[in-house]
Image (cartoon, grey):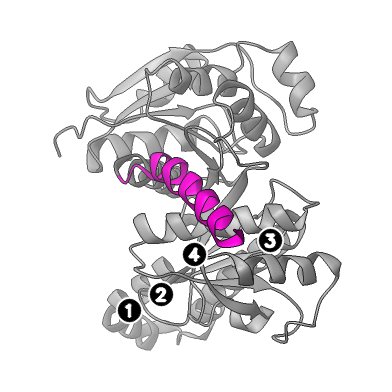
């Protein structure tokens, strides 16, 4: 595939299986997606990984010194390691040398680097990590945010998440009129804690989103909602639980297939169906989440990312760049503020 002109910087040293698996996913992305991938990290280690692949010309190594470890405090580590892989990768976006940054490393450091170097979109008080999950409706997905950037939230944050999520759902996921749900313990508007009650009122009164009410746990993957908003504590638990359910489902399918000749015949007959099941429920197929609210495309991947997840994260970055989702959020968020002020008057 020819080059699309998109340039994706990836923290090649971030993640449990870096750099081998990250580089493998990047090589695949450069070939299948036509993007130019800037591999940021230790040149010697990256070059050693590239020798294992028949890498094309759409790959470039950008040297970096050091990596932010998972047990380090993000801001302290970023200041102590100015030339770390996540710092250098994010700076490439700020300098215009890359259109997006991807990292499966320390999520707190990825978010902090994005905030320090790219800044927030004007009017957005807190960024949110948006993760896309499959639903019971074939071909339909739900965007859950926040899934980890903010463990404590104010009602206004959730309202901003809803606006950004609606814009993302519309322009990246192709939903014409996204239904927004507030994750809660009951569908009645009187249910929930103080955060949920106050957020429900704000979402109900916001004229630029289509608020469909509270979303109970069983409703989130029903296909009834396109966007589900919550604080990062609840969202992260939801995300990890959904990933575990998907993995468990795949394991059950494998174990329940007959053994021996019958099993081999069954797998052959169902091969296409099994592949589609894996694509729908396996979190590795989705790659990570977009950090919404910062002034640039930043994808935060799973710490356990292997090559398929790294590929998926780069694919997500490409979609965000080509849909111009950051520019749309900037423009439409300001428009939503103006409409909200006008409705009050």
The label on residue 217 is: none
Q: CA distance from mark 3 to mark 4?
A: 18 Å
Which element carries disc 1, helix, strand or loop?
Answer: helix
Sequence-first tag of 3 and 1: 3
Q: Which residues are magenta?
A: 323-345
Report crowding for label 1: few under 14, some 14 to 19, many 20 or more residues within 10 A (C-alpha). Answer: few
Residue wearing tag 4: 282
The CA span between labels 2 and 4 is 8 Å
Residue appearing at x 58%, y 21% in the figure: 117
Which of discs 3 and 4 lies nearer the camera? The answer is 3
Question: Considering only vertical position in the picture, is 205 above or below 81?
Answer: below
Q: Secondary structure at mark 3?
A: helix
Q: How many marks?
A: 4
Q: Are marks 2 and 1 in contact (CB under 8 Å)?
A: yes
Q: Check disc 1 and report the residue beneath it.
A: 273
Q: Which residue is mark 2?
A: 277
- Residues marked 3 and 4 touching at CB (< 8 Å): no
């Amino acid at each position: 595939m020819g080059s699309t002109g998109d340039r994706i910087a990836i923290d090649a040293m971030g993640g449990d299986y870096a750099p081998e698996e990250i580089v493998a996913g990047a090589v695949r992305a450069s070939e299948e997606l036509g993007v130019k991938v800037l591999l940021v990290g230790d040149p010697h280690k990256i070059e050693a990984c590239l020798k294992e692949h028949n890498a094309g010309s759409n790959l470039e190594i950008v040297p970096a010194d050091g990596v932010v470890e998972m047990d380090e405090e993000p801001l302290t580590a970023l200041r102590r390691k100015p030339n770390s892989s996540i710092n250098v990768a994010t700076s490439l976006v700020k300098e215009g040398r890359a259109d997006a940054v991807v990292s499966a490393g320390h999520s707190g450091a990825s978010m902090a680097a994005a905030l320090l170097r790219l800044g927030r979109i004007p009017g957005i008080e807190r960024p949110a990590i948006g993760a896309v999950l499959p639903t019971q409706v074939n071909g339909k997905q739900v965007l859950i945010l926040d899934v980890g950037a903010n463990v404590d939230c104010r009602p206004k944050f959730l309202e901003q998440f809803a606006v950004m999520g609606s814009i993302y759902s519309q322009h990246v996921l192709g939903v014409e009129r996204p239904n927004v749900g507030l994750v809660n313990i009951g569908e009645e508007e009187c249910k929930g804690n103080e955060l949920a009650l106050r957020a429900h009122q704000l979402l109900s009164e916001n004229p630029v989103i289509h608020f469909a009410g509270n979303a109970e746990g069983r409703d989130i993957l029903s296909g009834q909602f396109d966007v589900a908003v919550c604080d990062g504590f609840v969202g992260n638990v939801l995300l990890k639980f959904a990933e575990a359910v998907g993995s468990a489902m795949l394991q059950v399918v494998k174990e329940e297939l007959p053994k021996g000749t019958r099993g081999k015949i069954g797998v052959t007959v169902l091969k296409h169906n099994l592949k589609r099941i894996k694509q729908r429920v396996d979190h590795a197929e989705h790659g990570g989440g977009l950090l919404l609210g910062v002034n640039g495309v930043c994808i935060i991947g799973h710490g356990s990312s292997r090559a398929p997840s790294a590929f998926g994260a780069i694919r997500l970055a490409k979609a965000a760049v080509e849909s111009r989702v950051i520019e749309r959020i900037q423009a439409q968020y300001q428009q939503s503020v103006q409409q909200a002020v006008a409705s009050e008057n």
